[in-house]
Amino acid sequence: MKVIFIPVSVVTGLIAGIAARKAFERVWAVVDEEEPPAPDHREAPTLKLVAALALEGAIFRVAKGYADHGARRGFAALTGRWPGEEGPERA
């Protein structure tokens, strides 16, 4: 069942990535008028770079996680089988 879910997961991940990029751009526009610094910018202020990377990472993780979970719920609704683990392992 996991093999059948792979294409769904890939497409969902791409869409989530695009949505996350747009969300980050909108949020950053509220934070700062300048474009966000990137690691390859020579004169990027360290604090601003760290803030931009942390914000971007958080937005991407939430978008991809939420999209992946939604895709799995939809897949399970269509097939009757959950493509993954039922829950976290207990210690």
Image: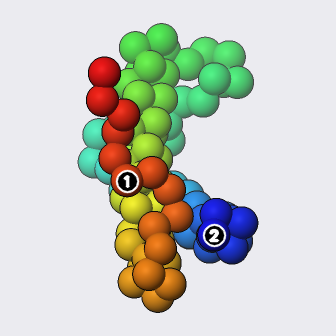
Q: Is residue 19 visible?
A: no
Report the residue marked by disc 1.
Answer: 86
Furthest residue in direction top, as rendered? 46
* Mark 2 Cα shell of 10 Å, populated few (<14), some (14-19), many (≥20): few
Quadrant for residue 34, please give it: top left
Report the residue marked by disc 2.
Answer: 1
Residue 65 is situated, as x and y percent measured from the top left of the image, at: 42, 52
> What residue is at 52 percent from the left and 64 percent from the top?
83
Q: In the image shown, does 27 or 45 lie closer to the viewer?
A: 27
Secondary structure beneath label 2: loop
> What residue is at 46 percent from the left and 88 percent from the top?
78
- Kindly identify which numbered label has been placed on residue 77: none
- Up-down: is 88 above or below 5? above
- Up-down: is 71 above or below 55? below
Q: Amino acid at mark 2?
A: Met
Left/right placement of residue 5 relative to residue 52 reads right
Quadrant of image for the C terminus = top left
Residue 15 is situated, as x and y percent measured from the top left of the image, at: 56, 69
* Mark 1 Cα shell of 10 Å, populated few (<14), some (14-19), many (≥20): few
Quadrant of image for the N terminus = bottom right
Residue 21 is situated, as x and y percent measured from the top left of the image, at: 51, 55
Q: In the image shown, does 73 or 15 lie closer to the viewer?
A: 73
